[in-house]
């Protein structure tokens, strides 16, 4: 029997410098490069995986250029998204607060077929740093109030919880299929 093929689009949102490009790179190619990687327009990355014996996932990440004050809300970017990664930097409270705006925009801009909001996972990156300003409770509270499917503290640099964060969002997406 031919395996079922799922093409999934996951958008990665967050303020500039939180680690979006690094995250996608770490997940897709398994390495971390120090330094800011300028994203011009939209970055795409694909990874194909066997989800189960009879299902294949072709996962497509859309990572948009960081924008500080204007939400990166163009139709083409959001169109047909299956899931969303909301990322902030645990050492930067502005990036944390920005997630609220982003989630609200996602909920208004992306209608889903079943009337539920798009599955979103809230990720606090850079947990390897000691100068964090957001506590785990802050993150849990925001995740609950925004109705994210889950929240995690991760380090893209040390490859902590990157893989399982993606798995978590994929599980939420695949549950509905
Ligand atoms: P983007 O603007 O959201 O795409 O962020 P980048 O992926 O370009 O990363 C911004 C900066 O944060 C770069 O200097 C990265 O090397 C750094 N960075 C990304 N992830 C981590 C992490 O987990 N820990 C630390 N300490 N730095 C990170
Ligand atoms: Mg980037």
Image: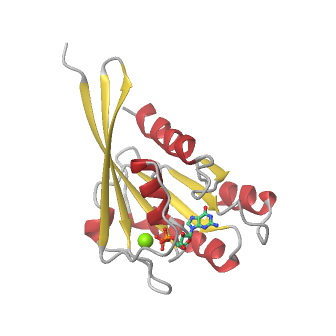
Task: Identify the residue at the far left of this view.
Answer: 2
Residue at horizontal 37 percent and vertical 49 percent from the top: 82
User: Which quadrant is home to the C terminus?
Assistant: top left
State the image coordinates of residue 153 (x, y, percent, origin top left). 68, 54
Q: Which residue occupies the foreground of this view, 13 or 101?
A: 13
Is 164 situated above or below 127? above
Is 82 situated above or below 174? below
State the image coordinates of residue 96 (x, y, percent, origin top left). 65, 71
Q: Quadrant of ligand 1?
A: bottom right
Res 123 quadrant in image: bottom right
Q: Is residue 82 left or right of residue 124?
A: left
Residue at horizontal 39 percent and vertical 43 percent from the top: 114
Res 78 quadrant in image: bottom left
Q: Which residue occupies the foreground of this view, 29 or 120?
A: 29
Q: How is the image coloured?
A: secondary structure
Residue at horizontal 48 percent and vertical 62 percent from the top: 22
State the image coordinates of residue 2 (x, y, percent, origin top left). 19, 18
Q: Is residue 166 left or right of residue 122?
A: left
Is 1 situated above or below 50? above
Q: Which residue occupies the foreground of this view, 121 or 155?
A: 155
State the image coordinates of residue 119 (x, y, percent, origin top left). 49, 49
């Amino acid at each position: 029997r031919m395996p079922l093929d799922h093409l999934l689009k996951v958008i990665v949102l967050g303020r500039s410098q939180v680690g979006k490009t690094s995250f996608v790179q770490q997940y897709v190619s398994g390495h971390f490069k120090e330094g800011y990687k300028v994203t011009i327009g939209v970055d795409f990355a694909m990874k194909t995986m066997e989800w189960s014996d009879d299902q294949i996932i072709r996962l497509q990440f859309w990572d948009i250029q960081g924008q500080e004050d204007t939400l990166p809300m163009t139709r083409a970017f959001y169109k047909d998204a299956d899931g969303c990664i909301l990322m902030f930097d645990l050492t930067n409270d502005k990036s944390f607060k920005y997630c609220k705006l982003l989630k609200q925009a996602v909920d208004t801009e992306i209608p889903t077929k079943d009337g539920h909001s798009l599955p979103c996972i809230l990720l606090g990156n850079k947990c390897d740093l000691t100068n964090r300003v957001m506590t785990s409770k802050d993150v849990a509270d925001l995740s609950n109030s925004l109705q994210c499917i889950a929240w995690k503290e991760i380090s893209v640099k040390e490859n902590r919880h990157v893989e399982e964060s993606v798995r978590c969002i994929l599980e939420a997406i695949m549950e509905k299929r």
